[in-house]
Image (cartoon, grey):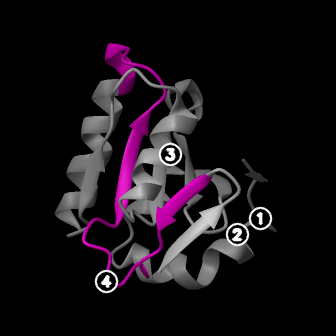
Amino acid sequence: MIKVNLLLQYLSLPPLIAPVKCSVLPLSNKADLLTRVAEVVQELRKNEVSVKVDDSSGSIGRRYARTDEIAIPFGITIDFETLNSSTVTLRERDSTLQVRLPVTFIFFPFFIFILQNAISKCNKKFLCFID
């Protein structure tokens, strides 16, 4: 289904049938962040989660929009706080809900299935915000 969100249009495929489940987006192209991106991607692929990395120089909002357009249901942002506290921002495409959580949480097997049911419940335990 194609959804229109004010100025944005995107393809909304359910996570179970989306060919790519998750994007990984570094906030900048600093070497420390790119090293952490590689670690996260490797771990996700080890758990058989299809991943696309967008390390282009565009703004994070534009990169979210690009991944929304191609039906990627979840985005993981690696930022400088990731280096300090080993947390990442997890964003869900359709609601644009963002949750800050420990990076190890995204490595659980079947994490996509857990997220489908739990992302709206996470905001009670973790910092969450809407973009």
**First reached walking from the N terminus: tag 4 or tag 2:** 4
Residue corresponding to mark 4: 17
Give the CA distance from mark 2 to mark 3.
21 Å
Residue 122: give its label. 2
Q: Residues within 10 Å of mark 4 (few under 14, many from 20)?
A: few
Q: Nearer the viewer, mark 4 or mark 1?
A: 4
Q: Is residue 108 left or right of residue 1?
A: left
Marks 2 and 3 close (CB-CB < 8 Å): no
Marks 2 and 1 close (CB-CB < 8 Å): yes
Tell me if residue 8 comes above or below residue 29 in the rendering: below
Q: Pick whichever, 60 or 36, lies toward us.
A: 60
Label 4, secondary structure: give it.
loop
Q: Is residue 106 left or right of residue 21?
A: right
Give the CA distance from mark 3 to mark 1.
24 Å
Tell me if residue 69 comes above or below residue 114 in the rendering: above
The residue shown at (66%, 56%) is: 99
